């Protein structure tokens, strides 16, 4: 027999961006609780509004599953003493199973007899188990939380009621001073308290009190209402997903409406208009079918259509004030020059131990010059890049960016064009912030991409130099995101990006102006490369590469990001080769011997003596190694593994016929040097010994 379970946590208004993930988390916490308590169930349906998180569990079993199992204890020789009496080990075992020695029987496993008992635990009634549902509530975690009253309890917002029902019965438990009931609360202004006859009445009864508890249905209502308004007015409306989710989680009972503003405000750059509407007021902007903004907006009220005209007037008034500010700031900014803004940045602190934003720009200019040259920008592109790097943060001191920080870079591009800068400079100013998120848009222009790399790398190196290296989940300066952005940009552009060599070249460039050098830049090389490699690992995991291929690529002696990525793809491509397993095993043997005897000889100064070769297999391997060395570093990364595969039969023949660790020291060192040369070019591709083959 099955039943239906309802659990609702009633709260003060939750921040909109936390509602959906918290609702999903509640579903998972509930499933985990039921699984751990051996209660089978069907669907687990999520419900959420700004004031509640809830789930309904359908087809919940009315009792736990019984446990019938055989438990294995100590071996017979341990369970019985010399007189055939039960030992303490046997008695302790059955006591732990809540049984007696009379329940013991012996069962042979691999020729040895062991104590066994049959264990039966009858499942408890679901209702008695569900009184522990407070653990589901307290197990929830949130990005921010708060305390209230005199309680030493943190939660996203204060809890005001808990509804818990199994069909038509209340599940009794309490949390803090709140006792469960079969009642909930309707809309804050339009609804009353509501009592549920059964758990499945939840959604229907709440709707009578102006609460649409199903977030997905509420979102569909909003989209439908907006579409209806747009069709009636012949408008083109596109609601961005993040804004739609936020609107959905700001209201319990949605009613869409539209308002208007003075067409004169359309002279303001549309980015200011859209930011004012979307980001500040949660309005949907409206355009004609050619994509031109129209002086209207659509919003969603948390309530019904009564007195909607007053709501429209109020929203129009608020937006007009916001746009008036935007227009004033924009007109005032146009009076500024770029040089004045750059000069003001000398008084804007980037970080107290790193210096001003102006000093950061000076360093980034050097970073950009080195990176631009390394990735192959033309002379004209380098000149454009240098101008962009000289001024790229100037918009931070403008009025519009001060009021609308979301527009940094975007307004920089617009103001740069107004001041007569080239399109290349202006675009780079906007693109240097990209990507803004881990999966965000990447810079489109090469100049913008280099400036973005320079800005991000300078931030990472500077914060590392002052000891601000991210640990655990602590990353206040978003250095992980910036390093991940570096990896994505390099991969997107397929650029040569040798991590440590670039760092050294940049420091050489900076040394010409000692004022720009931050102490301890030089001492962070290992941490810097490892940090970028960790983000490279994250990128490769997203590509769903095998973990051992990722390890093999990252642990190579290669420092160029693209070569590491291409090596991983090459290995993935050759996984199904017939000779793959044999090749990996042979090369692993070479690497192991080379590492084990690394200190025996100086490979850089050792000259292999062919007169010491004793067998044809040794001569043949030496010949193949010499041929491979001469071409290996010129090969495309995707072709390098095929070259290594071709060595496999020669390696096997060598090991079959020769003892590497020969008694004759000269012969031994000669053979180790031979293997060492092979290890060097193999490791320049990948640490093959990290691969798992079966």
Image (cartoon, rainbow, N blue to C red):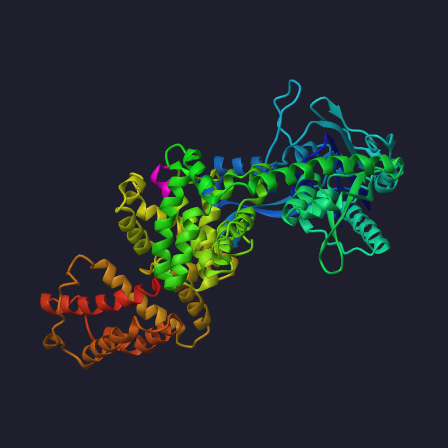
Task: Find residue 644 and report its image quarter.
Answer: bottom left
Residue 274 lies left or right of residue 539; in this view the side is right
Camera sees residue 255: yes
Q: Percent position (x, y) of residue 384? A: 42, 57
Location of the C terminus (image quadrant): bottom left
Which residue is nearer to you in this view: 601 or 638?
638
Residue range in magenta is 460-467
Residue 679 lies left or right of residue 183; in this view the side is left
Which residue is nearer to you in this view: 166 or 124?
166
Q: Percent position (x, y) of residue 625? A: 24, 75
Camera sees residue 80: no
Instruction: Tell me which residue sits at (66%, 33%) in the image.
Output: 135
Which residue is nearer to you in this view: 292 or 274?
292
- The vertical placement of 283 against 128, above or below, is below
Q: Percent position (x, y) of residue 153? A: 62, 25
Q: Percent position (x, y) of residue 389? A: 42, 50
- The vertical placement of 104 against 599, above or below, is above
| Residue 461 among those drawn in magenta | yes
Residue 680 lies left or right of residue 53; in this view the side is left
- The vertical placement of 206 against 600, above or below, is above
Instruction: Tell me which residue sits at (10%, 77%) in the image.
Output: 611
Residue with the most extreme front position: 335
Residue 358 lies left or right of residue 620; in this view the side is right
Task: Find residue 137 and report its image quarter.
Answer: top right
User: What secondary structure prevails in the magenta region?
Assistant: helix
Residue with the most extreme top position: 150
| Residue 149 among those drawn in magenta | no
């Amino acid at each position: 027999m099955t039943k239906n379970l309802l659990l609702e946590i009633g709260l003060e208004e939750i921040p909109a961006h936390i509602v959906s993930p918290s609702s999903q988390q509640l579903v998972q916490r509930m499933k985990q609780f039921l699984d751990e308590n051996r209660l089978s169930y069907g669907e687990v349906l999520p419900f959420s509004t700004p004031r509640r998180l809830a789930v309904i569990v359908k087809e919940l079993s009315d009792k736990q599953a019984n446990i019938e199992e055989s438990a294995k204890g100590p071996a017979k020789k341990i369970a019985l003493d010399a007189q055939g009496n039960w030992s303490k080990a046997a008695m302790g075992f059955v006591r732990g199973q809540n049984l007696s020695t009379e329940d013991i029987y012996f069962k042979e496993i691999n020729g040895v007899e062991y104590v066994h008992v049959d264990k039966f635990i009858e499942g408890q009634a679901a209702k008695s188990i569900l009184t522990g549902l407070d653990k589901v509530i307290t197990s929830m975690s949130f990005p921010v939380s708060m305390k209230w009253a005199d309680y030493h309890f943190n939660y996203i917002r204060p809890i005001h009621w808990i509804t818990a029902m199994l069909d038509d019965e209340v599940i009794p438990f309490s949390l803090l001073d709140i006792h469960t009931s079969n009642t909930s609360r309707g809309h804050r202004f339009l609804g009353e308290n509501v009592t549920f006859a059964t758990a499945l009445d939840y959604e229907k009864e709440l709707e009578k009190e102006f609460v649409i508890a199903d977030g997905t249905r509420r979102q569909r209502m909003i989209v439908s209402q907006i579409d209806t308004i747009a069709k009636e007015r012949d408008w083109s409306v596109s609601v961005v997903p993040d804004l739609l989710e936020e609107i959905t989680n700001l209201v319990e009972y949605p009613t869409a409406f539209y308002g208007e503003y003075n067409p004169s405000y359309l002279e303001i750059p549309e980015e200011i208009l859209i930011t004012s509407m979307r980001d500040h007021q949660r309005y949907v902007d409206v355009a004609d079918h050619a994509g031109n903004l129209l002086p209207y907006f659509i919003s969603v009220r948390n309530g019904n259509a009564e007195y909607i005209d007053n709501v429209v007037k109020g929203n129009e008034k608020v937006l007009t004030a916001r746009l008036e500010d935007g227009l004033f700031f924009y007109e005032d900014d146009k009076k500024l020059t770029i040089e004045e803004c750059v000069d003001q940045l000398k008084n804007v602190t980037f970080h107290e131990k790193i210096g001003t934003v102006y000093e950061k720009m000076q360093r980034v200019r050097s970073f950009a010059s080195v990176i631009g040259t390394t990735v192959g920008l033309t002379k004209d592109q380098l000149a454009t890049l240098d101008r962009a790097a000289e001024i790229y943060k100037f918009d931070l001191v403008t009025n519009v960016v001060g009021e609308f920080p979301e527009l940094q870079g975007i307004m920089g591009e617009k103001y740069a064009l107004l001041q007569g800068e080239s399109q290349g400079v202006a675009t780079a100013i906007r693109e240097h912030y990209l990507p803004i998120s881990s999966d965000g848009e990447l810079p489109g222009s090469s100049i913008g991409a280099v400036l973005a790399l320079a800005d991000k790398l300078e931030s990472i190196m500077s914060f590392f130099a002052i000891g601000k290296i991210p640990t655990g989940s602590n990353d206040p300066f978003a250095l992980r995101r910036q390093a991940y952005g570096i990896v994505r940009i390099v991969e997107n552009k397929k650029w040569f990006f040798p991590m440590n060599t670039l760092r050294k070249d940049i420091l050489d460039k900076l040394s010409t102006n000692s004022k720009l050098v931050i102490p301890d830049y030089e001492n962070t090389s290992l941490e810097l490369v490892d940090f970028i490699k960790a983000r490279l690992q994250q990128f490769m995991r997203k590509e769903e590469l095998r973990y051992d291929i990722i390890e093999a690529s990252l642990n190579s002696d290669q420092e160029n990001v693209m070569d590491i990525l291409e090596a991983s793809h090459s290995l993935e491509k050759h996984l199904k080769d017939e000779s793959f397993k044999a090749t990996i095993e042979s090369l692993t043997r070479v690497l192991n011997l080379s590492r084990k005897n690394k200190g025996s000889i100086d490979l850089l100064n050792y000259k292999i003596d062919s007169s010491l070769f004793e067998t044809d297999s040794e001569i043949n391997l030496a010949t193949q190694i010499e041929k491979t060395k001469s071409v290996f570093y010129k090969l495309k990364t995707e072709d390098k593994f095929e070259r290594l595969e071709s060595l496999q039969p020669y390696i096997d023949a060598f090991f079959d016929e020769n003892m590497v660790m020969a008694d004759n020291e000269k012969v031994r060192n000669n053979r180790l040097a031979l293997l060492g040369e092979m290890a060097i070019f193999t490791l320049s591709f990948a640490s093959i010994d990290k691969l798992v083959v079966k």
